[in-house]
Image (cartoon, grey):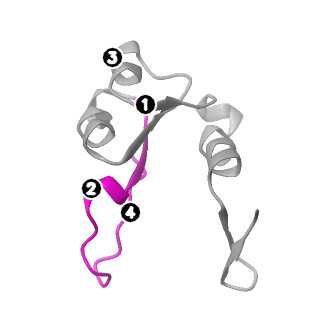
Amino acid sequence: MNLAYTPKCEPRLEASCLLAFGDDNNDIGILSSCGTGVTMGNAIPEVKAASDAVTKMNDEDGVAVYLDCNCWFRYSFNSGELLMSR
């Protein structure tokens, strides 16, 4: 699992502006080079060591839990709007 996304049509973003999630060896590179690397609770120890934070496991909706607790914006899929949540 590797959830980092930068739309091709957007101006290039610095790596320090990116948030990435991961749980296995193939994610270590992006977790250690982005602004905030978040590891899933079920990740192997080497991946946890390369990240800035650890969230809940995949089957506990770890990505959603991290975003809900740490991000100030929410995207409404119904209206297509980016909303302030705090």
Residue at (32%, 26%) from the top-left corner? 50
| Residue 16 drawn at (x, y percent) | 31, 53
Q: Is residue 72 above or below residue 1?
A: below
Helix or strand or loop: what does disc 2 sit on? helix
Question: Who is closer to the viewer here, 26 or 56?
Answer: 56
Pointer 3 or 4: first along the chain: 4
Residue 83: image location, x then y, percent = 70, 75
Judged by depth in the image, the label closer to the viewer, 1 or 2, is: 2
Question: Separation of disc 3 and disc 1 at Cα?
Answer: 10 Å
Camera-side mark, 2 or 4:
2
Q: Is residue 74 visible?
A: yes
Q: Could you tell me which residue is drawn at 28 percent across and 78 percent down?
A: 8
Which residue does the image show at 71% across and 71% down from the upper left?
A: 84
Q: What amino acid does circle 4 point to? A: Tyr
| Comes first in the chain, label 3 or label 1 | 1
Q: Which span of residues is magenta-colored?
A: 1-23
Residue bearing mark 2: 15
Please name the residue that numbered disc 3 is placed on. Answer: 46
CA gap, disc 1 and disc 4: 16 Å
Q: Is residue 17 magenta?
A: yes
Please tell me whether residue 39 belongs to the stretch shown in magenta. no
> In whole angstroms, how far apart are the C-alphas of marks 3 and 2?
21 Å
Q: Which residue is mark 4?
A: 5
